[in-house]
Amino acid sequence: MTERREKLEIVRDILSAIYEKKGRIKPTHLLYKSNLAHNKLKIYLGDLIQKELVKEENQDRSKMYLITEKGIKFLNEYKRVQEFMESFGL
């Protein structure tokens, strides 16, 4: 049986997917990389946009999602906390 991801893990996966694509990604690519259903991805993206971790940009009739400085900072802090927890075997 597969383990379900926690909300923070999903946020990390979405932000990482955008970051790994040089900070900008098309919605379809993000959908595949985040491994979420379309409606769930829309909910998460709406939340991340509202919290200013991601921004949406329209160019040439296509949509792109960009990670913000705040989003990059979140990823770095998440990694720090994860490493801290692993150092204690958690």
Image (cartoon, rainbow, N blue to C red):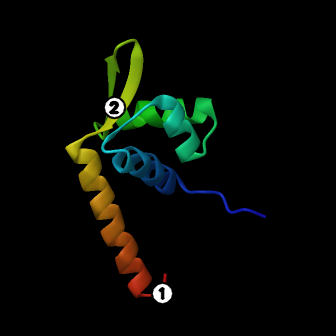
Q: Nearer the viewer, residue 43 or 59?
A: 59
Whether 10 is drawn above or below 78: the answer is: above
Q: Are marks 1 and 2 in contact (CB under 8 Å)?
A: no
Please, what secondary structure does the residue beneath circle 2 have? helix
Q: Which amino acid does label 1 sit on?
A: Gly
* Residue on which disc 2 sits: 50
Residue 67 in the image: state x and y as whole percent. 30, 41
Residue projecting furthest to the right: 1
Q: Which of 16 and 6 is in front in this view?
A: 16
* Residue sitting at x 24%, y 54%: 73
Q: Position of residue 10 (x, y in %)?
A: 51, 51
- Which residue reaches farthest bottom? 88
Residue ranking furthest to the top: 61
Residue at horizontal 39 percent and vertical 47 percent from the top:
15
Q: How far apart are labels 1 and 2 at the CA level?
A: 34 Å
Left/right placement of residue 43 relative to residue 52 reads: right
Picture residue at 37% right of the left edge, 32% below the top: 65
Going 46% across and 55% down the picture, which residue do you hit?
A: 8
Residue 3 place in picture, x, y as percent: 68, 63
As helix, strand or loop, the secondary structure at mark 1 comes to loop
Numbered badge on residue 89: 1
At label 2, the amino acid type is: Gln
Pick whichever of labels 1 and 2 is earlier in the sequence: 2
> Image quadrant of residue 51?
top left
Q: Is residue 8 above or below residue 54?
A: below
Count residues near mark 2 (Cα–Cα under 10 Å), then give few for <14, some for 14-19, many for 20+: few
